[in-house]
Amino acid sequence: MGTKNIKTREVFEAELKAGEGRFALFYSAWCPFCTSFMPAYDGEAAAGGAEFLKVCTDDLPELEDRFSVEVVPTVLYFKDGKLARRLDGALGRGLGADGLRAFVAACAAKGRGK
């Protein structure tokens, strides 16, 4: 499936209204932890099963503020247009592939009613 790069607040809002499960990676272009995490996120997106979005906080700081993203990278999961779960990055460590896989699996299981 791949990822969609979100460039405007309006496109982000439309994505949330368009479907069920949406993962949104909040990242910054200058962040080395984001750069090293991106292949893991893209890999999960390629596996399919949900929509994966990328939101660059450099371009859309209002979304970073709206969802209280304190550390990048952070992954938010939206269900039926509402924030349902979050995987916050750790300051000075970021996020890892194993944590992302577990997060995606937990969101999928919850979506199936488990």
Image (cartoon, rainbow, N blue to C red):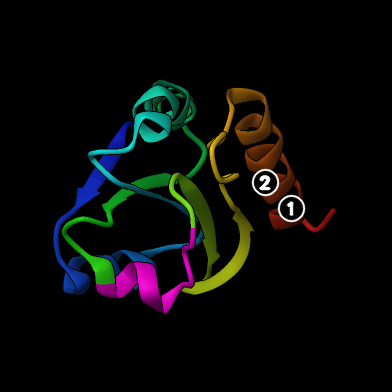
From the top left corner, tell me how far across and down residue 89 is, in percent.
56, 46
- Could you tell whether 93 is left or right of 52 in the image? right
Q: For residue 108, which numbered disc appears in the image?
A: 2
Residue at the front extreme, as displayed:
92
Which label sits on residue 112?
1
| Residue 40 as seen in the image, left or right of residue 108 | left
Q: Residue at x 21, y 46 (%)?
A: 5
SS class, disc 2: helix
Assess whether residue 104 is covered by the magenta stretch: no
Q: Nearer the viewer, mark 2 or mark 1?
A: 2
Which quadrant is home to the N terminus?
top left
Q: Position of residue 2 (x, y in %)?
A: 32, 32
- Distance in Å between CA atoms under marks 2 and 1: 6 Å
Kindly identify the residue that appears in the image at 67 percent across and 46 percent down.
108
How far from the left and from the top, in percent, is residue 39?
39, 21
- Residue 89, compared with residue 43, is above or below; it is below
Q: Nearer the viewer, residue 114 or 87?
A: 87
Q: SS class of the residue under badge 1? A: loop
Vertical comparison of 84 with 2: above or below: below
Q: Which residues are magenta?
A: 62-70
- Which one is nearer the viewer's eye here, 6 or 61? 61
Q: Amino acid at mark 2?
A: Ala
